[in-house]
Image (spheres, grey):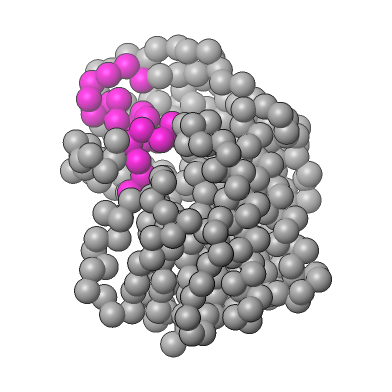
Amino acid sequence: MPISVVTGGAGFLGSHLTDRLLKEGHQVLAIDNLITGNERNLDHLNGNAKFRFLRHDVTQFIAVEGSVDFVFHFASPASPIDYLELPIQTLKVGSLGTHNALGLAKVKGAKFLLASTSECYGDPLVHPQKEDYWGNVNPIGPRGVYDEAKRFAEAMTMAYHRYHGVDTKIVRIFNTYGPRMRLRDGRVVPAFIGQALKGEPLTIFGDGKQTRSFCYVSDLIDGIYRLSQADFHEPVNIGNPLELTILEFAERIRNLTGTKSEMVRKPLPVDDPQQRRPDITRAEKLLGWEPKVALEDGLRETIRWFQTNLDSPARK
């Protein structure tokens, strides 16, 4: 039975990955310092003999007894609000945390998968974004703490692969949505859904013509699991190439929730990307993966979840 360690295991993506690994027959140790994660995302696993939780800051040495087959490094603040409020912690988990997680994989002879991000491409000058594009990132802008932390993490991961022979994988995650997102994390899906369900105005930054591509969480986790089983070491984009403007997306949310909410405009944040769409050719060829959940279906599931959890303190 494979044994997996998931850093950031109480987060949105980490908890869904933990569920998938358990379903695939893994034993899972989820590690999280709960700075942005929440144990309630793992409550349904209480009593599961194949699951353990450790509250720990991975920027400190990670000690795990026994054998480990996989290390999935998902620990990091990952939303604009989080990494603007926690800039030093974001840089530390991308650097020191990645170093410690790679060190664990090295000493255990485990495979390692880094959760990287489409933010490595910055405000892209190439569209759609392919893995061989080096990006257009402002290293000293407010978003640079997240972008550069992940770019450094990728460099460290490839160094461990080349120098130490660690079997590493890198997934570049594009916008993902689904149950267990935090309501006030600054990302567009929970922001629009929360505003719509409360009858509040939907906040549009800039002219709303900037584009995003949204992948449902089960599709993303399927791609990540497939990558963990593949013999490939360079970055792989996982995301949904369906591209919408923010205005178009806001209309989808209004229609699905039935809200009468108006839209209000606010200035565009510094270095906010104008276009975001993955080229998933590599994932299609290498992993036989493509997204399957239609946007409306995924949004309905997400809206239902928020309707149930809107007033929960864990979501604030």
- The residue segment tinted magenta is 180-202
Instruction: Reply yes or no: does residue 302 show up in magenta.
Output: no
State which quarter of the image contains the N terminus. bottom left
State which quarter of the image contains the C terminus. top left
Q: Residue lying furthest bottom in this view?
A: 1
Residue 285, percent from left and from top: 67, 65
Q: Residue lying furthest right in this view?
A: 163
Residue plotted at (63% across, 37% down) = 145
Residue 209, percent from left and from top: 56, 21
> Is residue 161 visible in the rendered structure shown here?
yes
Residue plotted at (51% across, 43% down) = 78
Q: Residue lying furthest front in this view?
A: 60
Residue 164, percent from left and from top: 76, 74
Residue plotted at (35% across, 67% down) = 53
Q: Is residue 98 above or below residue 88?
A: below
Say which quarter of the image contains residue 243. top right
Residue 259, percent from left and from top: 24, 23
Image-based side of 122 in relation to 218, left or right: right
